[in-house]
Image (cartoon, rainbow, N blue to C red):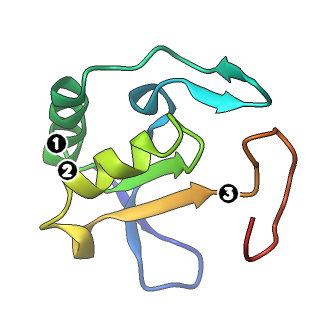
Amino acid sequence: MKYRTLGKSNLTISEIGFGTAQIGGMSHIGGRYIGYPGIETSKALRILNNAYDIGINFYDTSDKYGDGKAERLLAKAFSGKRDRVVYATKCGITATGNRCFEKNM
């Protein structure tokens, strides 16, 4: 695996990142479900750990992927490795589908 320094930080990330939309599953936004069907939790954890084992340490996620399921899976998979993984997460979309960047949505 090849790695790079992220911008001007001291973070070293894998050139290949792992997008977590599919392991998160469907999200409820604007009164309807959107996204990919979910993957069984045990299978999703195996996939995350396999990615880590081959050197991927950069994970892209969102609080809306599976209404937070993707972030919970990352926390569970990497609870003992948090200092060795980097997460890029997105926020700002409410359950109604509106954009909001207020402190208390």
Query: Alpha-carbon neighbours of circle 3 within 10 Å: few (<14), some, or many (≥20)?
Result: few
Measure the C-alpha gap from mark 3 to mark 1: 25 Å
Q: Position of residue 40 (x, y in %)?
A: 25, 21
Q: Decide which of tag 3 and tag 2 comes sooner along the chain.
A: 2
Residue at point 50%, 34% (across, down): 66
Could you tell me the amino acid type at mark 3?
Cys
Measure the C-alpha gap from mark 1 to mark 2: 7 Å
Residue designated by label 2: 77
Q: Height in image: 6 above or below 16?
A: below
Q: Position of residue 2 (x, y in %)?
A: 33, 53
Q: Dot 1 lies on which element?
A: helix
Residue at point 16%, 42% (across, down): 49
Could you tell me the amino acid type at mark 1?
Asn
Say whether residue 82 is left or right of residue 32.
left
Quarter in which the C terminus is drawn:
bottom right
Could you tell me the amino acid type at mark 2?
Ala
Q: Dot 3 lies on which element?
A: loop
Q: Which labelled disc corresponds to residue 49?
A: 1
Q: Decide which of tag 3 and tag 1 comes sooner along the chain.
A: 1
Q: Specify the farthest residue to the top.
A: 37
| Label 1–label 2 contact, CB within 8 A | yes
Q: Height in image: 11 above or below 46?
A: below
Residue designated by label 3: 91
Residue at point 47%, 14% (across, down): 37
